[in-house]
Image: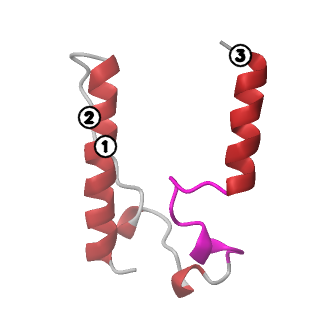
Amino acid sequence: MGLTCARADFEQTWQVVTSRLTQYLAGAHLIACQWGGDLGASLHCEGRSIPTYDTSKDAMSVLPEIEAATFWATLYDDPV
């Protein structure tokens, strides 16, 4: 992943964070802090040293088994 891609990912994530936080913290002053690039860690070898990295990049995807278990646990806790 190049620095340009990392910066684009950061900008996209920052937009989501600021839009969500300002919903709950009206008037909050948020300051961005980019940890990657020159100031922090970088992912080498396209993440090959991290088990299942290539299949777990999407934070919004959940295994069907976990989704079903969570659904039933929530229903069990609050059946209304």
What amino acid does circle 2 point to?
A: Ser
Report the mark closest to the observer, 3 or 2. Answer: 3
Side of 69 where 58 appears, left or right: left
Using the image, determine if residue 59 lies above or below residue 30.
Answer: below
Q: How many marks?
A: 3
Q: Main secondary structure of the magenta part?
A: loop
Local secondary structure at mark 2: helix
Q: Badges 2 and 1: C-beta atoms under 8 Å apart?
A: yes
| Residue at x 53%, y 66% (from the top left corner) | 57
Dot 3 or dot 2: first in sequence order is 2
Graded by Cα atoms within 10 Å as few (under 14), some (14 to 19) or many (20 or more), the crowding at tag 3 reads few
- Of residues 68 and 19, which is closer to you in this image? 68
Range of residues picked out in magenta: 50-63
Query: What whole-number distance in Å separates the C-alpha atoms at marks 2 and 1?
Result: 5 Å
What amino acid does circle 3 point to?
A: Pro
What amino acid does circle 1 point to?
A: Val
Graded by Cα atoms within 10 Å as few (under 14), some (14 to 19) or many (20 or more), the crowding at tag 2 reads few
- Image disc number at residue 79: 3
- Image disc number at residue 16: 1
| Residue at x 60%, y 73% (from the top left corner) | 55
**Quadrant assignment, res 16:** top left
Side of 24 where 69 appears, left or right: right
- Image disc number at residue 19: 2
